[in-house]
Image (cartoon, helix red, strand yellow):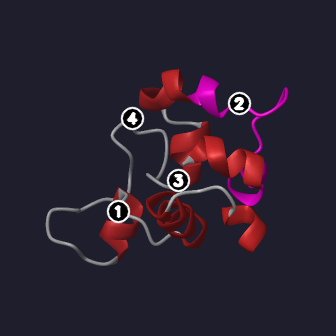
Amino acid sequence: MLKLHEGLRKIERALLTQTRTGKIGLVKFLHGQNVPGFTTATCQCRAGYETPRHMALYCRYETDRRNYLHIGKNRIYSQMVGTNEGAKHFV
């Protein structure tokens, strides 16, 4: 686990941990916590729940940022958040 965080700043390590645990300030988490104003877990793009995985792979509003996250020929979420190289780009 330490190698995964190697070379990341404190805020980046926190963001990566939140992403990997799902405990992050995105709509699906906030809706699940019954935060007022979050009546649905669906992303604004309406293509799925707003989760880190959705944002990185599917959200229509994040298309431009996805090119930066591209690792190899395929975008594989587990590589983005599960490897040091991927994590550096992801966060």
Query: Is residue 37 shown in magenta?
Result: no
Task: Say which element carries label 1.
Answer: loop
Query: SS class of the residue under badge 3?
Result: helix
Which residue matches tag 1?
25
Question: Element type at marker 2?
Answer: loop
- Give how far apart the Cα atoms at labels 2 and 1 are: 23 Å
Using the image as rendered, state which of residue 48 and residue 90 is in the foreground.
90
Label 4 SS: loop
Identify the residue position indicated by label 3 in the image. Answer: 52
Q: Which residue is mark 2?
A: 70
Q: Callout 4, which amino acid?
A: Cys
Among the 4 quarters of the image, the one containing residue 28:
bottom left
Q: Horizontally, is 41 left or right of 17 in the view?
A: left
In the image, is residue 5 above or below residue 67? Answer: below
Distance of mark 1 from mark 4, alpha carbons?
17 Å
In space, the residues marked 2 and 3 are separated at their CA atoms by: 15 Å
Q: Earlier in the sequence, mark 2 or mark 3?
A: 3
Residue that numbered label 4 is attached to: 45
Task: State whether residue 45 appears in this view.
Answer: yes
Q: Local crowd at mark 2 within 10 Å, few (<14), some, or many (≥20)?
A: some
Which residues, given as a range, are shown in magenta? 66-83
Of label 3 and label 4, which has the lower sequence position? 4
- Residue sitting at x 40%, y 39%: 46
Residue type pointed to by label 3: Pro
Q: Is residue 45 above or below residue 22?
A: above
Q: Amino acid at mark 2?
A: His
Residue depicted at x 56% and y 69%: 17
